[in-house]
Image (cartoon, grey):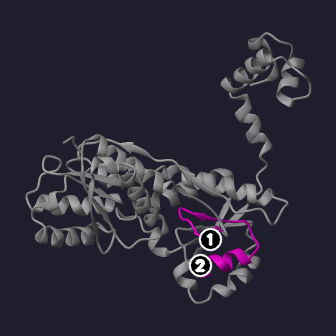
Amino acid sequence: MSLKKISEQSGVAISTVSHVLNGTAKISDDVRQRVLQIAKDIGYLDSRIKRAQTATLRKIALFVDSERLRQTDVNFVSWTILETLRKECEQKGVEIEPVLIDEIKGDYNKISERMTKTKCDGILVYFDENQKLLNEVINTALPCILLAGQEPGMHIGSVGIGDRNGARLGVEHLIELGHRNIGIVSWPGRYTIRQRLDGFKEAINEHQELGITTTSIQLDSFQPDIAEKGMTEWLEQHPDLNQITAFFCLADNVAIGVLNALQKKGIQVPKDVSILGFDDVFAGQMMQPALSTVHTPLHHIARCALEELELLTRRTSKNAPARRVELGCRLIERQSCKAV
């Protein structure tokens, strides 16, 4: 990947290639586009960008609740994100200083002192939207990013999923399949879950002319066994499913519980009713039938968060606004949904 190779493939002098890449002379649009395309195709531009990004992070603090660290089916989302973070930091030579949130509750005012002692270059807060905790993290004056979460006031930068967009994708899919009576299954959740609800409502409102009816079912938890119990109780009160033809569950863990409850009642999926999940966890793929779902780019969140943290360490202005990065979702069609 050299200037000479780009010169040979583009049919121009090495000096011309250099001028194009550095913007140091006026070059015709045709030549400029040809040189840039070849530089991109052979990977020169990507390697140049990476060389220019001098690593500024050597040690980061990871604020996380110990419950999120357990490798279980219920914790698939958290474990995937955190394991990717571990691998990314290992590859980049970044040391992780773990700070267990459940062990410092009521003692947040000592966070600044602890960060000074550990000499961390930046802070990642995983999944926790506790405003008191975030305020103390901000007060450290260290670069900080909320990982896989959002803070409504945007006092802190964040990297997460486009939850509202993902919910809209799910609704659009069910509408395309002909469903006009849709059940939305959720639980009292964090800000990100409320965004999924907002996305669902927005998409439904945009199709008012279709006369779509919705039923809201709120369970006590996203855990599959608790979701199954709550759904079983709902089914006992609504044996006709309230005429629902599709359930849109705002997490795959919930969808698994709902699917189990339906099957134990002799209700066949998708013959009698469709189920759509959200997250694309491995357990959902292994269900019978396999779960159709909104795929969330879990493997990209940690990488993007580290990039944002790197950018913050290079900022000269202390008053720059916080940035919210949302990663796009896509729909995965499997066997739990069908047209009506």
Where residue 69 appears, as percent x and y from the top left, is 47, 68
Extent of the magenta region = 131-154
Label 2 crowd (10 A; few <14 / some 14-19 / many >=20): few
Residue 153 numbered tag: 1
Residues 139 and 272: in front is 272
Q: Residue furthest top?
A: 11
At a point 21% along the width and 42% down the height, the residue shown is: 338
Residue 328 numbered tag: none
Label 1 crowd (10 A; few <14 / some 14-19 / many >=20): few
Q: Is residue 169 above or below residue 182?
A: above
Quarter-wise, where is residue 41 in the image?
Answer: top right
At a point 76% along the width and 52% down the height, the residue shown is: 55
The three-letter code of the residue at mark 2 reads: Gln
The three-letter code of the residue at mark 1 reads: Gly
Where residue 193 appears, as percent x and y from the top left, is 43, 65
Q: Is residue 40 above or below residue 277?
A: above
142 within the magenta span: yes
Relative placement, left or right, of 306 versus 292 is: right
Quarter-wise, where is residue 97 in the image?
Answer: bottom right
At a point 20% along the width and 49% down the height, the residue shown is: 288
Q: Is residue 216 visible?
A: yes
Q: The residue tagged with tag 1: helix, strand or loop?
A: loop
Sooner in the amino-acid sequence: mark 1 or mark 2: 2
Q: Is residue 140 above or below residue 243?
A: below
Q: Residue furthest left?
A: 266
Quarter-wise, where is residue 263 in the image?
Answer: bottom left
The N terminus, quarter of image = top right
Q: CA distance from mark 1 to mark 2?
A: 9 Å
Marks 1 and 2 close (CB-CB < 8 Å): yes
Residue carrying label 2: 131
Foreground disc of the pair 1, 2: 1
